[in-house]
Image (cartoon, coloured by chain):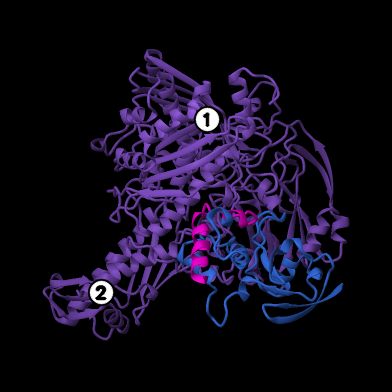
Amino acid sequence: MTELALTVNGVRREADVEPRMLLVDFIRDHLGLTGTKIACDTSQCGACTIHLDGQAVKSCTVFAVQADGAEVTTIEGLASNGTLHAVQEAFREKHGLQCGFCTPGMIMTTVDLLGRNADPTDDEIRYALEGNLCRCTGYENIVRAVHEAAEVTR
Amino acid sequence: MTAAVEAATTKLIGAPVRRIEDASLITGAARYLDDLKLPGMAHVAILRSQYAHARIRSIDTSRAAAHPGVIAVYTGKDFEHLPALPCAWQAAGVENLVNTPRALEIDRVTFTGAGIAAVVAEDRYAAEDALSLIDVDWEPLPVVVDVEQAIADGAPQLHENAPGNIVMDWSCGEEAGTNTALGEAEVVVRERLVNQRLIPNPMEGRGAAATYEPATGQYTVWMSSQDPHIMRLLMTAFVFGIPETKMRCIAPHVGGGFGTKIFLYHEYVLMAALAQKVGRPVKWVETRSENYTATTHGRDHVTQLEVGAKRDGTITALKAKTLANLGGVLSTIAPGIPTTLYGRMLSGAYRIPNIHCQVLGVYTNTGMVDAYRGAGRPEATYVVERAVDLVARELDLDPVEVRRRNFIPPDAFPYDPVGILRGLAYDTGDYEKPLDRALKIVDYDGFRRAQAEARQQGKYRGIGFSTYVEICGAAPSAWIGTVGEGWGASMWESANIRVHLTGQVVVTIGTQPQGQGHQTTTAQVVASELGIPIEDVTVELGDTQGTPFGYGTYASRSVAVGTVAVYNSLQKIKAKARRIAAHMLEADVEDIDFEGGKAFVKGSPESAKTIQEIAGAAALAYDLPAGEEPFLDDTTYYDPPNCTFPFGTHVAVVEVDADTGEITLERYVAVDDVGRVINPMIVDGQVHGGIAQGVAQALWEYAVYDENGQLRSGSMMDYAVPKAEFFPRLEVERTETPTDVNPLGVKGAGETGTIASTPAVVNAVMDALAPLGIRHVDMPLTPERVWRAMRDASGDRGEA
């Protein structure tokens, strides 16, 4: 077992974990933050996307111990004081989700994208989302939601 | 009523109301199956066959059982007392030679992925570790994966009761008449069409958890399901042999289904049985690898098509002989999909006087095949829409004109397609309307001019159409009962509506969404009919305890059957409200109007009693009309008199790279007619997602087994689930032709996109390649396949 200390959604967490434990399992099973999803097991789908030190990463491809000392943000940490993040609002407003299973990852990736590019084109959005799969929406309304979030945020 | 109330309520039907469901989904608060944590819960991992066809000589679980953290290990022999799973929808009117999965297989497997042992452990890591410590002594057997080889002489035989690997030999239509018409036709076009196997890929895989209470003999089973009531019925009546009251089935949030979560799988039975054996709650959540091998696949037809026509393009006969690959064992409704939902829809949107279809269901050493979004209708639409284009090509006619020539005209409804629907008839239709609109959007004439110019420059651009019709809203129970076309049960839906004494409304329904937004759509209808704020409506579903029986969500039936049950129930609620209001207002009930959330004496809206006041009076029951029961409550069951038949036109515009065969989807236009629309935002979303899946079949997706029955496309690394960058903007519009089947005028919108889009794209690519004389290439139209076809057509055998 290996000791681990990190900050998740602004709260300091300490744990003793198996070195092989995936960060996504730590977040879901040990911290009970089940908004982060597991869907593909092979790092294709992005349902497990979180922010690690401010950058979007697939938490199924990171060992929990690699996050020692890091700042982690999950979907549960995105809204502040009961106010939804602009990207969350935009996904609802543009019907950018159906079953919702890919949605936490999509939202976390979108927040990362808009942090780097405040006014992305259609092509830039579609390229940025290439690591996040959705089976419900055909991506049409997800792309619209990202535009909406960009517009509201600017 | 006042204009303000009217504006706030009646406009709800047809309005793009933002979804009630979303608040929990966008914040990570929604609970799916894998998010369930029960006190004392143990975790299950399942050992699956790595052989496609093999005998199990013995299984030694001792090393696995000794692994730290392992509670117990079980094999098929531990569940020998449980019968194999039921095949609940067999092909109607013919013998079905049924073989289905068991809780765990005992002595033989017929596909890779069959479950043969289960490890129960303290955590999932330990359970997965122990799987590799189970020793199985296998005797591999000869394998056949190809459907045409499986029915050939000398092929490996999968099941003793199914000689030649035939599940069933089913047909519909008039064979002799169709043969005569083909013999007399001025032109006959023949083609072999492969509708390849697809892996549905809901983003959330399957899973199940269970508890058992020895004191009461009560099971509770949670599962990611499209139809918890059916799951309980099948498990209690056909597997465990217990009263249905001894089992409660719960579907939490479901992360997509697309058909795969309709069925009863061995793991659900296994979890209930394990909860009893282990004496602790248990949970199993499939890996994506398991989802690929052990969850159902879709499509997988090989069809020999013959179409007869006159020289003017009038189609005179259509004959299809289809081999439907159903896998190594049968899933719950596998034989029903390529028969009732395929053969019976082969008239498409056209008046075809002679139709015959024969379907052979075939066992092969591959994963189970069952309903996948569209379920039979995409396969039928592919055959019909390709047939029309092949006729147009043969006769050098415009495919749009051939469609118009053969369309069922608006005055021909209700239309009985020469008896192949066995008594059902297309309800309403106006097929030219969406076609005309779509042609305008794509500027058809302009495109043909641009295409001609592009061809001058050696560019291959094409346009393709799919003017489909499909069947939704399953189904009239009497029809099912007389011809055996379905579950072997009825297919009505139910609704219970309670108006609490505060005026808050709770609606329970028996359908089960997987992302379709049933709560929002239902609440819109309730709020609109009762004239109350949508926030005052709570929709409950997904739990057999506390909701009336319902058959679940598939075949685009939830609105066309389920929401109609809600609507009818609301009429009874309003009738009771009027009776109570009449008593309160000391008036005759005939003189009471109910509108905008208020009951009032005709012409005197100032005397109104609000629905909240009436509900309060009904609940208190201090002073009710003589003989009136307390409480504003109703339970309604709705059995539709007919199915519904949405239609429309989809158009794809493509360019094929002359050097690489790569296809660019330049535009995609859809004009659907799904009847009356309750929430256009949700319907648009359904159409978008459906188009993506259908386009993906045409261009990218393909489940590939090697000759040993190993799934080569066994993960998202190897199987082409499309990405955002694969698609252009989708241009979606509608016409609105209400159905006369139900009072809401709704038809169903969950599958039109998938059903329509696949042939539109293939037709577009074949149109692009027409100058090369290429008339057909089987899907998926990968650059390699298209490049090979172009090379062969050009006679250039050199390396490109």
Q: Quadrant of residue B613?
A: bottom left
For chain A, the rendered hue is blue
Camera-side residue of B460 and B495: B460
Whether labels 2 and 1 belong to a single chain: the reply is yes
B470 is higher (above) or lower (below) than B127: above
Mark sitting on residue B459:
1
Which corner quadrant holds the C terminus of chain B? top right
Region in magenta: A126-154
The purple chain is B
- Residue A41, given in percent of the width and then of the height, sits at 71, 56
Pointer 2 local density, CA inside 10 Å: few below 14, some 14–19, many at least 20: some
Which corner quadrant holds the N terminus of chain B? bottom left
Whether residue B279 is visible, yes or no, is: no
- Residue B641, given in percent of the width and then of the height, sits at 32, 48
Camera-side residue of B110 and A23: A23
- Residue B304, given in percent of the width and then of the height, sits at 52, 24
Mark sitting on residue B5:
2
Q: Residue at x 24, y 84 (%)?
A: B623
